[in-house]
Image (cartoon, rainbow, N blue to C red):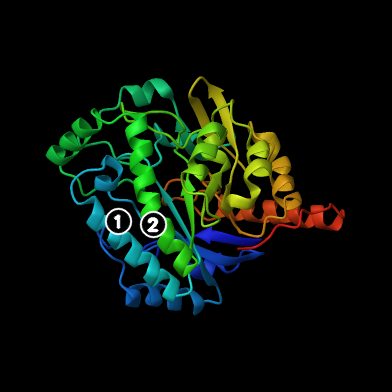
Amino acid sequence: MEMTFLWYGESDPVTLDKIRQIPGVTGIVSAIYDIPVGEVWPLDKILDLKKRIEAKGLSLSVIESVPVHEDIKTGDGDRDRYIENYCETLRNLAKAGIDCVCYNFMPVFDWTRSELAHELPDGSNALIYIDETVKNMNPLTGDLSLPGWDASYTKAGMKALLEKYQTISEEDLWNNLKYFLDRVIKVAEEVQVKMAIHPDDPPWGIFGLPRIITNKQNLERFLKLYDSPYNGLTLCSGSLGVSPDNDIVDFVKSFADRIHFAHIRNIKITGDHCFEETAHRSDYGSLDVGEIVKAYYQSGFDGYIRPDHGRMIWGETGRPGYGLYDRALGAVYINGLWEGFAKAGLSRKDMKKI
């Protein structure tokens, strides 16, 4: 496996010079953030990003994300043009040597939390989700914004989009996802880029919008929509793990040969549809991270791993969930577990590579 770290580009206070000092981190996960959703990523901009990363002795390992335009998700408007643009972006990424792309199919909103800096008992602060608070949020007021959301919508545009989704069922969303996959995965196979869908975060509906990448049954259904090794998963323990019905260790074992990218973090379930993000160590949360990493190791996982959301610790401030220190601790913790399993002589499944 390769340990990677998410970097938000030159505006990120967590610089490449800092990331390269984390023991065991060799890869960077990044994207091009100044291109409107749905437009083609030019090859020269991709190569420039790669060059800046490689100049620091690191590799551009995974693109996270190439966003999917809402017309594709709704099956409306210019979806065919946006899908062709997506395919052209994949071709350009392949020319630059990229072999893994993370994306999601969440309607309108990316990951959602009710508070970005909740103080924990140890004095650190973290992202949390309280169901009642989120139910009282109104995305039309204009004061609701989280990192990762597309901020380009006007109030009128957001209202129209949310009204459109009132006519779209979960089954419609499944059909629109299949339409997308039928065209995109053919290109991914041709250029040998592994597509890795990220689960919905959290894995239940918000603001009356359908969400479908939420549990084992739906992951199985997704993989059957286009049965190809290039149609795979970004398995995020923190996203799926907030539902007590989801067994992440079982998911790793069940889908090992279709997991291209692993997001590993811990969460603490605090109530029904309520959780807080916490330190990576198993005893800090509701997930057994040791068993999760063990399942990856024994399954012969040879893809990319990154520590996911971290707390803000030691007085650090910055992009919520994406500070340096706690994610660095997470990377070292995961690498330590991996080395321990290797030195203990645990057997590994011989997985066939693409």
Closer to the camera in the image, 106 or 16: 106
Question: On the picture, is 124 further left or further right than 185?
Answer: right
**The disc label shown at residue 293, or none:** none
Secondary element at tag 1: helix
Percent across and percent down for residue 47 are 40, 77
**The disc label shown at residue 83, or none:** 1
- Mark 2 surroundings: few (<14), some (14-19) or many (≥20) residues within 10 A: some
Percent across and percent down for residue 279 are 61, 41
Closer to the camera in the image, 69 or 8: 69
Closer to the camera in the image, 319 or 121: 319
The answer to which of marks 2 and 1 sits earlier in the sequence is 1
Tags 2 and 1 in contact by the CB under 8 Å rule? yes
Quadrant hosting residue 191: bottom left
Instruction: Evaluate whether residue 65 shows in this view.
Output: no
Secondary element at tag 2: helix
Closer to the camera in the image, 60 or 145: 60
Callout 1, which amino acid? Answer: Ile
Q: Residue at x 50, y 37 (%)?
A: 221
Q: Is residue 57 above or below residue 37?
A: below
Q: Is residue 297 above or below residue 130?
A: below
Q: Tell me the residue that label 2 is attached to.
A: 184
Quadrant position of the N terminus in the picture: bottom right
Percent across and percent down for residue 351 are 71, 57
Q: Residue at x 62, y 45 (%)?
A: 255
